Image (tube, grey):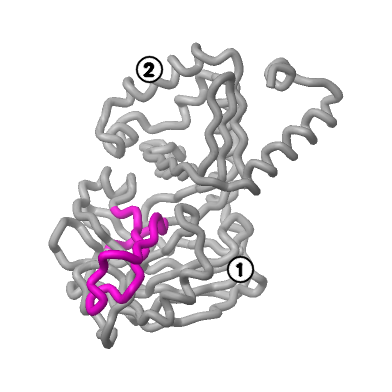
Amino acid sequence: MLRIFLLISFLLWSGKALAWQPLLSADPHAPEHLFVVDKKDQFFLVFSNKSPLTKIHAWQCSTGEVHGDKQEEGDLKTPEGVYFIEHKRTTNLDFEMYGDMALTLDYPNPVDRIRGKTGHGIWIHGRGGEVIPFDTEGCVVMDMKYMRKLEQMISLQQTPVIITSSANWDSKENQERRSCEIAALTREWARAWSDKSDSYFEFYHPEKFAQSRDQPFSRFKKNKLRIFASYEWMDVYIDQPKVLAGPGYWVSFFGQVFNSPGYYSLGVKRLYWQEDEQGRLRITGEEWRDIHDPELEKRYETARRKAQTSSGSLSDHEAQR
């Protein structure tokens, strides 16, 4: 598996970030494949997590005309961080500029918004002509033959892309303490939510979470408490979380099922974690995407049947389903 190990000497935060140069190595809490943009060398890299860590593709790409991490709309820079492929566009595209396919990214993500970054429309897309290094307004551009290969390897709303100033990697497997901790915290967060526990709110950093959502934390809390009171029971199931590190944050992401009397949802949740003033990891942002995933639903039902069998009896809410 893969992880991002952040070398402190490579990342200093004092208003604006310096170049982000993560070291990639094996970690069981990261995805099966990792997609990495190396802006310095102008390559889109694909790694396999099968031990040892293996680079399986290196596709030439092009990024922003101006070097550095994107800060504001129109600065012609490509953002650095962890971004998720959201949608595929194949219609109404200028072929010369975009080829015949574009994959949209979720820039700005919640941490970007906390940091006051602006801009939109950061895509990974093709080009109808020659791909020239450092020749975009902020997007990541590749030849269409590489775009078609990438298309076959991703799942919309679920596949992250790591955009770096410069990527380095180590084939040795290492266990990253932070990724283990965040995976465990994510599972505790889900249990607290399902139990309607007051401790659920302690997982959040109120000020930063409010910034990422552009609304007071008190409104978020009031809405959740209303939901707690509305449902006699709630069942929150999550897949085993995957964890990746970005510049100054971590993101855990997973399939999620929410089940309660009269309401059922299925999708992908992303939690963005940062350290607070005491060094404690807190949620500063989250994203939710509805998806149609019959396999996730099957995993949920299987997990609940196993839980029922091991307990030997139905819980109150299971008896009412």
Query: Circle 2 sits in a helix, a strand or a loop, which is it?
Result: helix
The quadrant holding residue 305 is top right
Residue that appears at 50% across and 74% down: 46
Q: Nearer the viewer, residue 307 or 290?
A: 290
Question: In which quarter of the view is residue 138 placed?
Answer: bottom left
Specify the quadrant of the image occupied by residue 41.
bottom left
Q: Nearer the viewer, residue 6 or 141?
A: 141
Q: Which residues are magenta?
A: 79-107
Where the C terminus falls, by quadrant?
top right
Q: With respect to residue 25, does 241 lie above or below? A: above
Verify whether residue 62 appears in magenta.
Answer: no
Q: Which residue is mark 2?
A: 222
Residue at 71 percent of width and 15 percent of height = 316
The correct choice, above or below, for 177 with respect to 274 in the image is below
Q: Amino acid at mark 1?
A: Asn
Kind of residue sitting beneath label 2? Lys
Residue depicted at 31% across the width and 71% down the height: 140
Q: Position of residue 161 (x, y in %)?
A: 42, 63
Q: From where the camera sits, is residue 10 visible?
A: no
* Above or below 61: residue 277: above
Among the two numbered marks 1 and 2 on one chain, the one whose residue lies closer to the N terminus: 1
The relative height of residue 84 versus residue 195 in the rendered view (above or below) is: below
Comparing 177 with 278, the one in front is: 177
Element under disc 1:
loop
The residue wearing badge 1 is 49
Q: Is residue 97 left or right of residue 189?
A: left
